[in-house]
Amino acid sequence: MHFPNIDPVAFSIGPLAVRWYALAYLVGLIAGWKWGLALAKRDPNKLLKPELFDDFLTWAVIGVIAGGRTGYVLFYNFNEYTADPLEALRVWHGGMSFHGGMLGVILAAWIFSHVKKIPLFAFTDIVACVAPIGLGLGRIANFINGELFGRETDVPWGMVFPHGGNAPRHPSQLYEAATEGLLLLLIMALLSRSNKIRMRKGFMSGTFLALYGVFRFGIEFFREPDPQLGFLFAGATMGQLLCIPMFIAGVAIHAYSLKSPRAKSKRV
């Protein structure tokens, strides 16, 4: 199969070109914000005012961009940015890391919950439910850009990517969109319907971390490693290595949640 010829630019307004990748971030944040509001209204313990998610939207944007860029610099291309530190500020040149973006949002949520004096896990449980929306859309945008493609393959649906040589490759971006995006979103949505589960602080947060770690670790076997890094310890990719502590953290938070059911309180 040949890669579909999709223009990475969705539309232009004069000299301003709006790319599908930017739209994926925008739609993911807005959709996540709207669903976060709905989940807060359905919180069985009435712990959070829905309006808090209006306030957090800006924090989330900063966390995703700053964390995603910092993560890419530190985890994937440190030597290049050491040689030219100012390049790290040129976000429009591309280069974002999910794990860095996740850490950025976690840090933003931790500071936000401290400032607003709200329970951290009560807040991140809702953030975890909405995060797969942006993940799935982001991977679709990666596919449209023809980037982050998979390893060479002979499966019937293998695609010849513009920058991947002449051999067909796994459309691993779509694998990630289906698992880390759609499947994880459905699982989180189903779990969020149970008041019994939502009454346990951290259960949803731990579920997201553990399942994303499993899904991403598995998909990395089909994804071409970053050329500047290649295969690392024991033949693992950087994405796989970063998923290990993520999975461990998810399991640990699960253990905590099972021992600490969410206490009932008034909305704050």
Image (cartoon, rainbow, N blue to C red):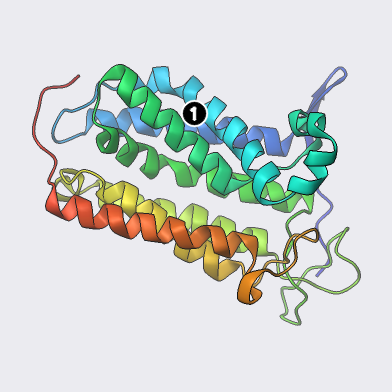
Residue 143, x across and y down, in percent: 71, 53
Instruction: Tell me if 170 is positioned left or right of 112 in this view.
Output: right
> Pointer 1: residues within 10 angstroms few (<14), some, or many (20+)?
many
Residue pictured at 84% horizontal, 67% vertical: 160
Residue 100 to residue 212: above or below? above
Instruction: Tell me if 127 is positioned left or right of 225 in this view.
Output: left
Residue 21, x across and y down, in percent: 70, 39
Residue pictured at 33% horizontal, 47% vertical: 205
Residue reaching furthest to the right: 166
| Residue annotated with mark 1 | 60
User: Residue 8, can we see it?
Assistant: no
Instruction: Tell me if 88 is positioned left or right of 214 in this view.
Output: right
**The C terminus: image quadrant:** top left
Residue pictured at 49% horizontal, 41% vertical: 103
Q: Quadrant of residue 46?
A: top left
Q: Which amino acid does label 1 sit on?
A: Ala
Instruction: Tell me if 202 is positioned left or right of 151 in this view.
Output: left
